[in-house]
């Protein structure tokens, strides 16, 4: 096998991995986590135990991606 073909395959494989990481994320930014992927919410809620609604951790709307569509 010609070594230039192996080099070409290696360069194409590396480009497939590296190029998408350099591009900006596609899709609109999640409005709940503001693109961070994590939420830390606390507001008064009389129906919740203790009187407060508390939500922390990975954003349930975007699944922690920070964007709405992949």
Image: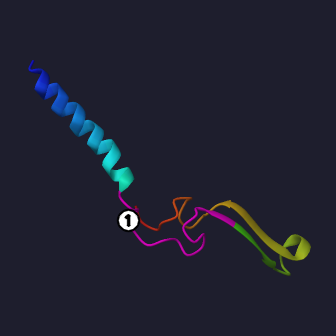
Q: Main secondary structure of the magenta part?
A: loop
Q: What residue is at 48 percent from the left and 66 percent from the top?
A: 67
- 31 or 2: nearer the eye? 2
Residue 59 drawn at (x, y percent): 61, 63
Please, which residue is most extreme toward the right here?
50
Residue 23 drawn at (x, y percent): 35, 58
Q: What residue is at 84 percent from the left and 74 percent from the top?
A: 52
Position of 3 with respect to 14 (left or right) is: left
Position of 32 with respect to 28 (left or right) is: right
Q: How many numbered discs sit on the rendered protein? A: 1
Residue 14 sits in which quadrant? top left
In this rendering, the answer to whether 30 lies above or below 5 is below
In this rendering, the answer to whether 11 lies above or below 58 is above
Residue 17 sits in which quadrant? top left
Q: What residue is at 42 percent from the left and 66 percent from the top?
A: 69
Q: What residue is at 23 percent from the left and 36 percent from the top?
A: 11
Position of 6 with respect to 66 (left or right) is: left
Structural crowding at the residue carrying mark 1, measured as other residues with C-alpha within 10 Å and reported as few (<14), some (14–19) or many (≥20)? few
Q: Which residues are magenta?
A: 23-39
Residue 13 drawn at (x, y percent): 26, 37
Position of 29 with respect to 4 (left or right) is: right
The C terminus sits in image quarter: bottom left
Please, which residue is most extreme toward the top here?
1
Please, which residue is most extreme toward the left here?
2
In this rendering, the answer to whether 20 lies above or below 38 is above
Badge 1 marks a residue whose secondary structure is loop
Q: Any magenta on residue 38?
A: yes
Q: Any magenta on residue 37?
A: yes
Residue 53 sits in which quadrant? bottom right
The residue under label 1 is 26
């Amino acid at each position: 096998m010609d070594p230039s073909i192996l080099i070409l395959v290696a360069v194409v494989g590396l480009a497939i991995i590296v190029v998408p990481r350099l591009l900006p994320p596609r899709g609109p930014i999640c409005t709940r986590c503001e693109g961070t992927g994590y939420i830390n919410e606390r507001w008064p809620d009389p129906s919740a135990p203790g009187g407060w609604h508390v939500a922390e951790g990975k954003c349930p709307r975007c699944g922690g991606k920070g964007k709405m569509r992949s």
